[in-house]
Image (cartoon, grey):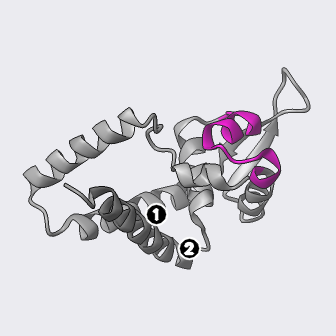
């Protein structure tokens, strides 16, 4: 079984690179997608909470949110409890973009997994989830974002 971790690393890099290429025509980069996905999943969360979940330093996150806000994909709303804090919401355009990204993600996954049968895909997904859980990786959060310090 020697070399399995290298192949996982090799595939991970390749898959990430191909996904980046798939979303580039939308004017997005992977950290934008992570932000949109988490705000879609948990609307109204604060920038601070999002920074903590993604592991992106607050100053870097602010710049990424500024970019999404300039494109009218996300909006900041002052929270009544703390006027210094902002709650994040997707705009209607942001919801549409998130749906497009999800569709691209599904196409991307189907293309990558095409050589496998449905049963093999299910088995691979279960085994990879077990490994990710054992390593303490949070579902839906790419650990590469945490390196942006």
The residue under the point 50% across, 71% down is 20
Task: Identify the secondary structure beneath mark 2.
Answer: helix
The residue under the point 60% across, 56% down is 94
- Badge 2: few (under 14), some or many (20 or more) residues near its Cα, within 10 Å? few
Where is the N terminus found, in terms of image quarters? bottom left
**Magenta segment includes 54:** yes
Left or right relative to 111: residue 136 = right
Q: Residue furthest right?
A: 84
Q: Which residues are magenta?
A: 44-61
Residue 2 vs 104, above or below: the answer is: above
Residue 56 vs 46, above or below: the answer is: below
Task: State the residue position of label 2.
Answer: 26
Q: Residue furthest top?
A: 81
Left or right relative to 128: residue 21 = right
Nearer to us in this view, 53 or 102 = 53
The residue under the point 84% across, 24% down is 80
Give yes or no for contact between labels 2 and 1 (Cβ–Cβ under 8 Å).
Answer: yes
* Numbered badge on residue 30: none
Task: State the residue position of label 1.
Answer: 100
Give the percent coordinates (x, y) of residue 137.
Answer: 46, 39
- Badge 1: few (under 14), some or many (20 or more) residues near its Cα, within 10 Å? some
Give the percent coordinates (x, y) of residue 56.
Answer: 69, 48
Q: Quadrant of residue 89?
A: top right
Magenta-drawn stretch, dominant element (helix, strand or loop): helix
Give the percent coordinates (x, y) of residue 35.
Answer: 62, 50
**Magenta segment includes 123:** no
| Cα–Cα gap, marks 2 and 1 | 9 Å
Nearer to us in this view, 122 or 45 = 122
Task: Identify the secondary structure beneath mark 1.
Answer: helix
Q: Tell me which numbered mark, 2 or 1, is placed earlier along the sequence.
A: 2
Number of numbered discs on residues: 2
The residue under the point 56% across, 55% down is 144
């Amino acid at each position: 079984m020697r070399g399995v971790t290298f192949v996982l690393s090799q595939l991970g890099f390749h898959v990430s690179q191909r996904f980046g290429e798939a979303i580039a025509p939308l004017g997005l980069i992977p950290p934008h997608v992570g932000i949109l996905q988490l705000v879609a999943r948990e609307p109204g969360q604060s920038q601070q909470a999002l920074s903590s979940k993604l592991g992106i330093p607050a100053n870097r996150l602010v710049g990424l949110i500024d970019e999404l806000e300039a494109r009218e994909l996300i909006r900041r709303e002052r929270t009544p409890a703390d006027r210094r804090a902002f709650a994040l919401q997707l705009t209607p355009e942001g919801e549409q973009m998130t749906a497009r990204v999800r569709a691209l993600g599904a196409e991307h996954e189907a293309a990558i997994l095409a050589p496998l049968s449905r049963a093999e895909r299910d088995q691979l997904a279960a085994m990879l989830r077990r490994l990710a859980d054992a390593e303490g990786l949070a579902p839906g959060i790419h650990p590469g974002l945490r390196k942006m310090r």
